[in-house]
Amino acid sequence: MKLTLRIWRQKNAESKGRLVTYPLDNVSPDMSFLEMMDLLNEQLIMKGDEPVAFDNDCREGICGACGLVISGIAHGPLPKTTTCQLHMRHFRDGDEITIEPWRAKAFPIIKDCVVNRSALDRVVIAGGYTSVSAGNAPDGNALLIPKPEAELAMDAAACIGCGACVAACKNASAMLFMSAKVGHLSHLPQGQPEHLSRTRTMVAQMDKEGFGSCTNTYECQAACPKDVSVGFIAELNRGYLAAACKG
Amino acid sequence: MKLDAKIPSGPIEGKWDKYKFDSKLVNPANKRKYDVIVVGTGLGGASAASTLAELGFNVHAFFFHDSPRRAHSIAAQGGINAAKNYQNDGDSVMRLFYDTVKGGDFRSREANVYRLAQVSNAIIDQCVAQGVPFAREYGGYLDNRSFGGAQVSRTFYARGQTGQQLLLGAYQSMLRQVALGRVKLYPRTEMLDLVLVEGAVRGIITRNLFTGAIERHAADAVVLATGGYANVFYLSTNAKASNATAIWRAFKRGAGFANPCYTQIHPTCIPQSGEHQSKLTLMSESLRNDGRVWVPKQKGDQRPPAAIPEGERDYYLERKYPSYGNLAPRDISSRSAKEACDDGRGVGPTGKGVYLDFADSTARLGRDVIFERYGNLFEMYERITDEDPFKQPMRIYPAPHYTMGGLWVDYNLMSTIPGLHVLGEANFSDHGANRLGASALMQGLADGYFIVPYTLSNYLASNKLGKVTIEHPEFKAAEDGVRERTGKLLRLKGKRSVDSLHKELGRVMWEDCGMARTEQSLTRALGKIPALREEFWQNAIVTGSGQELNNELEKAGRVADYFELAELMCQDALQRKESCGGHFRVEYQTPDGEAKRDDDNFSHVSVWEHQGDGKAPVMNKEPLSFETIKLAQRSYK
């Protein structure tokens, strides 16, 4: 396959970026999207140019490190798929593909397509855990958890923290990410004691980081590689209301 | 090098209790006066950081990712073992201990493995309390599945994402301590050297990957939890950035490196599709619970799998190992797949693959049950190969996955450098020559939650450590060394990319130091590797500068270390004139092709000691004695 790539190049956080066009030949349909990027980078290196910087690590769709906006869609056109698991067989010979970083106020660009997502960690630091120290725990079977509840918790916990939901949202809201963490813990008895305080402190931190508000357009759910449901956002809002009423 | 494993005396069941009672404690009010550096935030690192902070120590956690949650532990799929015996099928601490020692082909240290089995149950409890959403049965109780090398069902799991869920548990616990001010995070920071003062570790030198700043950090003790080195093979199931730099720097500073040749080749990975391949993807071993492995009986049979009648299929694992069948341990399963392919009976476009077939189990249990168990794995397989495992059998082939070798540690999990503790895959201690499935997660969390918090406290309480600051001359010397090396890498402006040299090294290692090794192949590799290393230092290209995010510079530093480590792996494999677990020397096998150990001459840990650059390392031995379990030839028939 022969492709025309338009890629966001930006030297560092301070400098201005721009889209640069690169033709690329000999792309195999069996390549992953990132292997296609490797091919381009190998050619750039051989010419003595700087390769395109992009985050990636496990390349099997679980670490959440990778994330490119591919022709306007976070993680590309295939549903429920991270950038690293998108294969070139879903593109056609001669395609023009635009490749950009996640764009959000809370995710400053570091270089090319690499952004800083530490804001998501800070939202978790604000309360995304159960306060249990090693050694405290009762027997694992002392807490019975109905299978459907455990499954719901797992559905939410499947979030890989990639930030695609933020990138896909016109308001750059992190509601899907945050509601997934709150939802994971609120569907388990272990998460109950701190449920309301957690909801309050995490929402406050999210606002402080500069993430936008949710206006229910559900782009986040469409972009989510792990199929996390916007139903968790509704639950979060109910929890937030309860937390606000209780002061 | 003095190797004292410091194993407590007394019967094996009581050693850990005795250790805990005999160890010295740090007064609670004094704990905050100690700084502990933890490098790596996978299961071992994150659990150690959170637990040490809960005890009151000042913890500094370093990781090269943007978030600690991205460590490669996250990719573990299948599960975590524990001796809960919830299934009432005869499990016990003793049985988990026995299975692990036997699975490791009698090349691990009994006392460490017993302790691992002992604390395994507490790990499950801890994780449940954190909110890890383990699979449940309809009654609300925890569910289990079976894994290779065991005849009991003791593996706890969270869909196909157990590593992710356990890591999120540890990560969240660590972030709770960040909120409490007891852990400080250092994201995008790579450790490039250790600093020793008066023989003990007192800090590290790091590079900030965003700004390129080289920085000094002092502490009273250092914990390395930086994972394994399977990326030496280039193509492996490890994440792209997983690397050996931290443990290799420690080796060069005097830490013994144990059993570098013990590498695990995982039997169930998706076969390579072409030269462009950048990594191999594992399909969880749990699939072997319900999948049947087979190849055609006839050599070169090109028919599609559905057209090959039952009678013309060779279910070779069931045939050769009737009692364990498709759940034979990893090393045996991998080698059998290689034998079938070498025999010309491999499947798929490259002939390097075997079938993993779910047709029988789907017919028996129904599509829904199979989908519930493995749905996400099936989807992942289809995404990569464009084939649906419900319509045609999966194709799998072995790939480098885990390294049992690592830095030598004693019972305290302390290396030969005082104060340097090593956890998880980065150490060598628990898995011998072969690791059983679902045991890596168990070890990482055992080390971090329940072992190092005790042993590190004991170290700090038993040693009078003077105050050391980053102004100490040793810090300056180490920093100068890092700057010099970084500069040397940045001056490489040759004609070959770092990746192309890494790929070439990987091919040499896969061919000559992979699943089957011979004196001839290892000698050949030992001839090729130094030449390739020379080529790297003469002819590699490293683009960009040192004052910015520079992936090529990061890669070059890691690959430079692989060239040295690869040579040590081959030397170790060459001297170990026996076959054991993942180390299969073709010259040493039983008449029916199984690994043949030589307990008279090789029942020891091979511990390598650095002698300076350009000098041959020296090998030391820690003898292994088996007092509880009788040495026997492994049999899974």
Image (spheres, grey):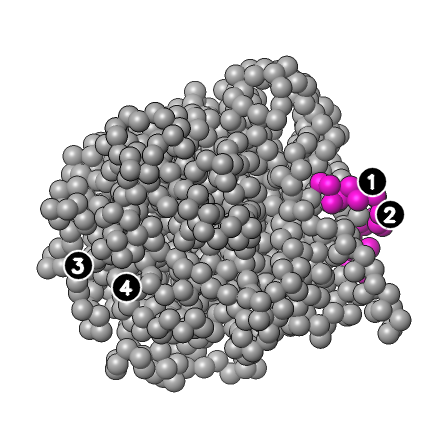
Element class at badge 2: loop
Direction bottom: furthest residue: B21
Labels 1 & 2 near each other (Cβ < 8 A): yes
Q: Residue at x 56, y 16 (%)?
A: A1
Q: Which residue is mark 2?
A: A215
Q: Residue at x 60, y 29 (%)?
A: A52
3 vs 1, front mark = 3
What chain does mark 1 sit on?
A: A
- How many residues crowd around disc 1 within 10 Å: few (fewer than 14), some, or many (20 or more)? some
* Badge 3 amino acid: Gln
Task: Specify the label residue B101 is tagged with.
Answer: 4
Respond whether the residues carrying marks 1 and 4 are from the same subunit. no
Q: Which residue is mark 3?
A: B633
Q: CA distance from mark 3 to mark 2?
A: 65 Å
State the extent of the magenta-drawn residues as a range: A204-223
Respond whether the residues carrying marks 3 and 1 are from the same subunit. no
Task: Specify the label residue A170 is tagged with.
Answer: 1
